[in-house]
Image (cartoon, grey):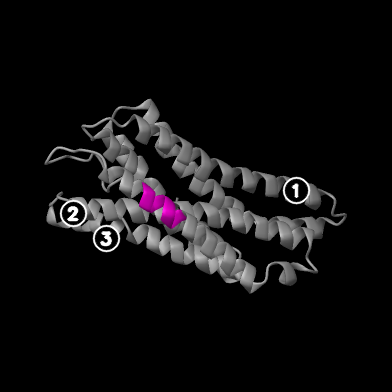
Amino acid sequence: MHFFLCSLSLNDICFSTSTIPKMMLNIQTQDQSFTYTGCLSQVCFVIIFAVLENFLLTVMAYDRYVAIFHPLSYTTIMNLCLCVLLLLTSLSINTVDALFDTLMILRLSFFTALEIPNFFCELPQIIKLACSDTLIDNIFIYVETCIFAGLPLSGIIFSYIHIVSSILRIPSSEGKHKAFSTCGSHLSVVSLFYGTTFGVYISSAVTDSPGKTAVASVMYTVVPPMLNPFIYSLRNRDMKEAVRKLISRIASLL
């Protein structure tokens, strides 16, 4: 369990680092320029870390499934070799997918100077700016989204259906509470990640405003990595007490 938490934390750092430093530099210097090579690199890294987060959340759901269903043999099933294998397999798939997406952009034709209506380079918006035929590219993105978003989400839902059914069979209320507390943080992180991700696609579908779409895109690259450590630290007793005191102080001021 701690292995995947460390992996998720490291991935969050890399995910936010792939967009925020350049975005902050552009804001500070008022220079909105972006090189073609830099844009391709950013697209590649954003895809790698976004899809890896998706896979990590799925693997962590399976990890909790094993912890609740097979508590006595948990350390045997989820041994270090299996954890490393799952992580490396996910990273390899993500890297191949990101490289394929980058090669897909290289085959497109663009004008010399383009304005990307976003704070960072994002694959769908770059494809929209191409002056060559993008039908195949749009079909590939649709299929890719169904595979790399739909399958992991289905795995998470499937794991939690079995987890909830197992928890409901626990006779004691203390045992139920302990089991639910094991999954609470992960469910919050999953809801945050998929909520912000789906928000991007919904906002781009219902509005033609580039500004609103850009803000929605920043949300899923900044908010989940920023809040994930806080969500998992709420399981710490000292952290809970500190948050409780903070809320009490704010309430007294109001």
Local crowd size for mark 2, using a 10 Å CA cut-off: few (<14), some (14–19), many (≥20): some
Image height check: is 233 above or below 164?
below
Question: What is the CA distance from the residue labelled 1 to the residue labelled 3?
Answer: 41 Å
Q: CA distance from mark 1 to mark 2?
A: 47 Å
Residue 189 lies, in percent from the top left, at 54, 53
Q: Is residue 53 visible?
A: yes
Disc 3 marks which amino acid? Pro
Label 3 packing within 10 angstroms: few (<14), some (14-19), many (20+): few
Residue type marked 2? Asn
* Amino acid, disc 1: His
Secondary element type, mark 3: helix
- The picture places residue 243, in percent across and down from the top left corner, at 53, 62
**Left or right for 77, reference 26:** right
Q: Is residue 168 left or right of residue 90?
A: right
For mark 1, what is the residue? Answer: 162
Which comes before the other along the chain, label 2 or label 3? 3
Q: Mark 2 highlights which residue?
A: 26
At 39% from the left and 52% from the top, the residue drawn is 98
Is any part of residue 233 visible from this angle? no
Tell me which segment is drawn in magenta: 94-100
Looking at the rendered image, the quarter that the N terminus falls into is: bottom right
Q: How many neighbours does mark 1 have within 10 angstroms: few (below 14), some (14-19), or many (20 or more)? A: few
The local secondary structure at tag 1 comes to helix
- The residue that mark 3 highlights is 21
